[in-house]
Image (cartoon, coloured by chain):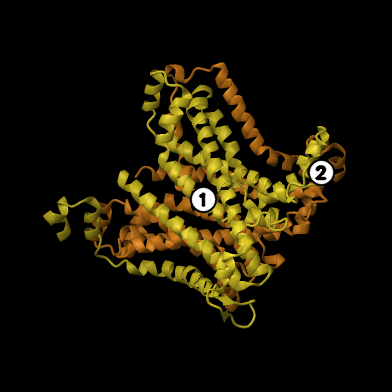
Amino acid sequence: MSLGILTEEAIVPASRKPQKLRKGGGGFTKRTGTSFLVLAFLIASAIAWIAPLYLAIVNSVKTPEEYAASGPLSLPSQISFEGIVSFWQQADFSVKLWNSFQISFWVCLIAVALSFFTSYAVGIGRIKGRFWILGLFMVAFTIPGEALMYPLLRMSKMVGLYDNIWSLIIIFAVLQSAFGTYLLSSVLSDFPGEIIEAAKIDGAGTWRTLTSIVFPLTRPTLTVLMVFFFIWTWNEFLFPLVLLPSNDSQTVALSMGLASGQYTSDPTTQAAAALVGIVPTLLFFLIFQRTLLKGVTMGSVK
Amino acid sequence: MTTISDPATETAVLHLRKERSTSKGIYWPFLVPGLLGFGVVVVVSLLWNVYLSFTKWNGLGSPKWIGLENYQKLMVDETFWQSFLHSVVFIFAMAIVPTILGLLISASLFDYIGPRFGNRTSSAVRAGFFLPQIIPISIAGLLWTWLLSSQTGIINTVLKQIGLESWQQNWLGDASWAMVSITIVLIWIQVGYTVVIFMSGLARADQSVHEAAAIDGATWFQRFRIITLNQLAPEIGVVLLTTTVAALKVFAPVYVMTQGGPGTATTVPAYYSYFNFIQTSKVGYGAAVATVLAVLLIILALVILRFQNKQEENR
């Protein structure tokens, strides 16, 4: 869950940075020999960082014969989708994609709704015992999944949701909303009290205030949370591993983890597997990057 | 209405005023769905798990109460202590090293490369480091298993091609290399996170101090050591704490790349707990390992809470 620790701060830089940097300023912008060296070194490191992905792409379109003959570093002489197609069929990848999508989709909707309601009571309602509630929720997203795993496994069997994606949807919705509540509560406690007050004077009840005032104004933040919940859920490994044993209910991240080592004698198929697994995440990162930035710039107006 | 015209309220501090003015209205129903889910998924499960840690059970029939026996066994269980030792190595790989690298990379990108070669250059380099962060960890594990594989892996193939055959290793299958290999993968994954957080911290910080120091003849490294590190102190704190939590929770990379092996060479607490629960059906023992880990992480969470409260006060 490496993305699990991304906070909102992580989304801020790209949107704010350009205004802060300026040209000019004497020695600050001079391109010396040293500066080219530093730049070369950084670029080389960044290239080394993306090299594994590059290698996956290059080798996933090679034939096994070419891989054996010319090794992993050479560019493919012809593009072959053999490895990708064979992995896709062996792993029944379309089913995994659809499962992952469904789980992530429902989790991000339900988790955002749960976080929003709870943090509305905590941040705006300022109900008694709110510090305890927040503390509890924080504990919920710090404890390891292993400490909940076995009871949840038994419970899902009891209610007949074992090997069913809904057990995962419920569990993740609650766990993600613990983080969401924690974050949203601090956002909402900065919400201008005058607006709430004005709504109350105009006769709006708490539900009305929530739907027609607080919700529209916090929508950008909620969108950001949704995108993050989606990605985190997509990437989860432990709970799918324990709760989704059958092939038809597995997720992308789970089937990839299980496929590791399965193709050691077939390196091009393994490269294809890595590539096929990476592409969806890469795609929605590219798509949602704009949503993230938009959400942040809109939210920063407050 | 009365709260607004009340003179005492007008002089009160902001958060007190808010508290009084919004304390009317009925808010508790909004807590119901969240707390209900939380109660079932977290509270019940956690307590159940603690109960199981005092029992002996293979998952069939009913658990047998054995008191503290599991914990007594843990105290002398070498694998258990070894797994925490591995966690310490992973704290180094996920918290310490990425923080140091992240500081150096982000500071040089932000106030050295950025102003000289433009924002695009620095954003592109940052994107390169960030890329591993967006891949699911299990897929990163799959990718590296392929790179590190002893027979057909890229690293060994390349070493052979350039005539360094003697450098070839069974990277994941050799007990003395497996930890090193996983450590490198974790660093690879984690650096992007620290770079992004630190760059956002730098964007918020006041740049005039830097400029003044530069005019006074301070070198880049002096400015880094004295100004940048101070400006980034809050971010460094947050990053160290959150990545330490993540390091203690490591499961997927170990499961995918080595299954805790060879032998127990790469076993971590989370994996050891899973192994007892599922692989060997020692449910009570697995629950005890998970409980110890949970207690440790809860303590860390409380430290984080305190840390954040302190920052709020300083603001």
Amino acid under label 1? Thr
Q: Position of residue B26 (x, y in %)?
A: 29, 68
Q: In the visual, does A158 lie left or right of A6?
A: right
Residue at 43 percent of width and 49 percent of height: A220
Amino acid under label 2? Ser
Q: Position of residue B63 (x, y in %)?
A: 58, 80
* Label 2 sits on residue: A80
Q: In the visual, does A66 lie left or right of A251?
A: right
Quarter of the image with the C terminus of chain A in it: top left
Q: Chain of mark 1?
A: B
Question: Is label 2 or label 1 in front?
Answer: 1
Chain A shade in the render: orange
The crowding category of the residue bearing disc 1, from other C-alpha atoms within 10 Å (few below 14, some 14 to 19, many at least 20), is many
Q: Quadrant of residue A301?
A: top left
Q: Secondary structure at mark 2?
A: loop
Q: Secondary structure at mark 1?
A: helix
Q: CA distance from mark 2 to mark 1?
A: 43 Å
- Do pointers 2 and 1 mark residues of a single chain? no
Foreground of the two, A296 or A238: A238
Q: Which mark is residue B171?
A: none
Residue farthest to the front, as pictured: B76
Residue at 63 percent of width and 66 percent of height: A242
The crowding category of the residue bearing disc 2, from other C-alpha atoms within 10 Å (few below 14, some 14 to 19, many at least 20), is some
Residue at 67 percent of width and 50 percent of height: B141
In the depicted structure, whether residue A55 falls above or below residue A27: below
Residue A152 in view of the camera: no
Q: Which mark is residue B244?
A: 1
Foreground of the two, B300 or A213: B300
Q: Position of residue A171 (x, y in %)?
A: 53, 66
Chain B shade in the render: yellow
